[in-house]
Image (cartoon, helix red, strand yellow):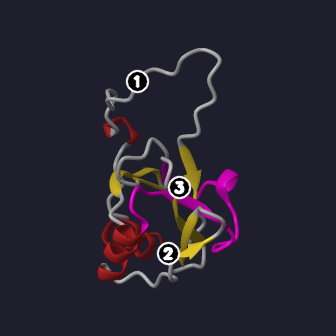
Amino acid sequence: MTDTPTPAKEIPEDSGNPPVPPGTLLLELVPVPVTDIERAKAFYQDRLGFRLDVDVNPKPGVRIVQLTPPGSACSITLAEGLPTLDMPPGTLRGLHLVVADIEASRAELVERGVEISEVEDLGGVFYAYFADPDGNTWCLQHMPWR
């Protein structure tokens, strides 16, 4: 995808997302610093099952990839050529993916080839930890009352 830039005008205008109500602060995009966008894109899509929303080259030297976890209203972005998102790869820590069944979710990730810790009970809230290829850390979190 990096050889032929996709014009930003090809991003769909009607994404199906609801309008932003006045006075709200919606967290909808988290930049994830990586060294290799293709490798990271494959990890998030193929290993974690994130949906690819956008993969564009709006101008030479700039690439923006946006992916969304299943069922989430918040996406991640992998970007290059944007100084405002320039962070050392692998420095993002502790992003939480909340799940309904941590054992089933963990087993699915193991089946997809993700190296993930055993489930830990931290006082009634359960966690399993993993990292992307650059060392950005994530966890599955299960709160039984949800």
Question: Closer to the camera, 124 or 115?
Answer: 124
Vertical placement of residue 24 versus 104, above or below? above
Do the residues bearing badges 1 and 2 touch, measured as CB atoms within 8 Å?
Answer: no
Question: Closer to the camera, 71 or 145?
Answer: 145
**Left or right side of 34 for 17:** left
Residue at the disc numbered 2: 36
Vertical placement of residue 131 versus 4, above or below? below
Q: Nearer the viewer, mark 2 or mark 3?
A: 3
Q: Amino acid at mark 1?
A: Pro
Classify mark 2: helix, strand or loop.
loop
The residue positioned 42% from the left and 76% from the top of the image is 39
Question: Closer to the camera, 112 or 12?
Answer: 112
Vertical placement of residue 24 versus 28, above or below? above
Residue 118 covered by magenta stretch = no
Vertical placement of residue 97 versus 36, above or below? above
- Residue 93 location, quadrant: bottom right
Which residues lie in the magenta part? 75-102
The residue positioned 56% from the left and 59% from the top of the image is 96
Classify mark 1: helix, strand or loop.
loop
Q: Amino acid at mark 2?
A: Asp
- Taking the view exactly as shown, the residue that stands out farthest to the top is 22
Report the Cα–Cα distance between label 2 and label 3: 33 Å
Residue at the disc numbered 3: 143
Residue at the disc numbered 1: 18
Q: Nearer the viewer, mark 1 or mark 3?
A: 3
Report the Cα–Cα distance between label 1 and label 2: 32 Å
